[in-house]
Amino acid sequence: MIFAMVVIGGVTRLTESGLSIVEWKPVTGALPPLSDAEWQAEFDKYQQFPEYQKINRGMSLADFKGIFWWEYVHRLWGRLIGVVFLMPFLFFWMTGRIPPGYRRRLVFIFLLGGAQGALGWYMVKSGLVDRPDVSQYRLAAHLGLAVAIYGFILWTAWGMREARGRAGAAGPIGAVTLGLLFVTILAGAFVAGIDAGRDYNTWPLMDGRFVPAAYGALDPWWRNLFENIPSVQFNHRWLAALVALHVLLMWRRTEKAGGREQMAGRIALGAVGVQFMLGIATLMTAVPVALGALHQTGAIVLFTAVLWANHRIRAAG
């Protein structure tokens, strides 16, 4: 469900639907408008904010419904994740079925989920003031926390299912690969946050140069990492290439180990190849919704495979 949530969030961003619901009602907001009057009231609220006034002025109610539904599904899916996690957790707790040492970890995961919902609203609020777009910093934080929760849950689930065994062959290269991949995903959020993927739509050169002319044009220098379109896109491109190289090195290590590590290494190698090609195709076609969503999906598939290779636990004996 979290995997699907990340994909739904990506589509919500790509279709520019994220600012269509201008209130945060964690409980009562679970129901969509059910009458023409309620739809009109929701549309009237939307018209009071910058996205309508500066970008979508004159939008019809039918067009508003199109963007509303993506954001509604995104928020509803988040609520459902909370329910799907909490109900079994309470049952297992009350019946004493939670393994020793896992209770606090599971409570922490649930709290992270709640924090993610609050962070999502904090992100949306940044687009309801002056600029009709969410802050790329908050967008990156929202995506980063989603990936972290997803990874933490997988790690916990694998730990429950697997007996402890020897460390595998992935070693330090696996941990470095995972860290680089996480940073690259965050860099992709900054690309999305400032629409950097719609410029410099050639590969491998950018405007005929390896390093674009405007790289580092902002002052102070650190703003270029997050706010300068050529710098943000260049960094994401070559971080991705560095991830591909590290996945290749990790694959060579895991091939010698056999078993699940070998399988995870092979899956990661295939996933990084597909993801790299998806990234190039998405860039060269100026980020159509379908390819953009596939590219974000590929990132989570790759993250899963690299995380699995890092888990390195074998069944006892």
Image (spheres, rainbow, N blue to C red):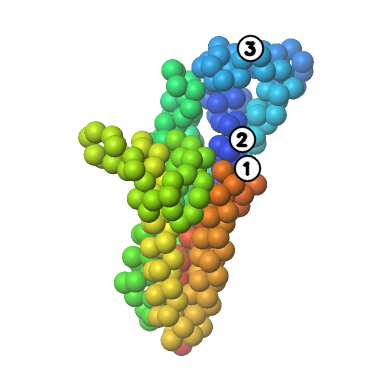
Three-letter residue code for mark 3 = Asp
Residue 15, numbered label? 2
Q: Name the residue rendered at 29%, 37% in the picture.
A: 217
Which sits in the foreground, 302 or 217?
217
Three-letter residue code for mark 2 = Thr
Position above or below: 161 against 315: above
- Do we see residue 273 in this rendering? yes
**Badge 1 local density, few (<14 within 10 Å), some, or many (20+)?**
some
Which sits in the foreground, 271 or 42?
271
Q: Name the residue rendered at 58%, 28% in the picture.
A: 27
Q: Which residue is mark 3?
A: 44
Residue 36, numbered label? none
Q: Which residue is mark 1?
A: 289
Which sits in the foreground, 221 or 275?
221
Task: Assign a secondary structure to mark 1.
Answer: helix
Contact between labelled residues 1 and 2, with CB atoms less than 8 Å apart: yes
**Badge 2 local density, few (<14 within 10 Å), some, or many (20+)?**
some
**Mark 1 or mark 3, which has the lower sequence index?**
3
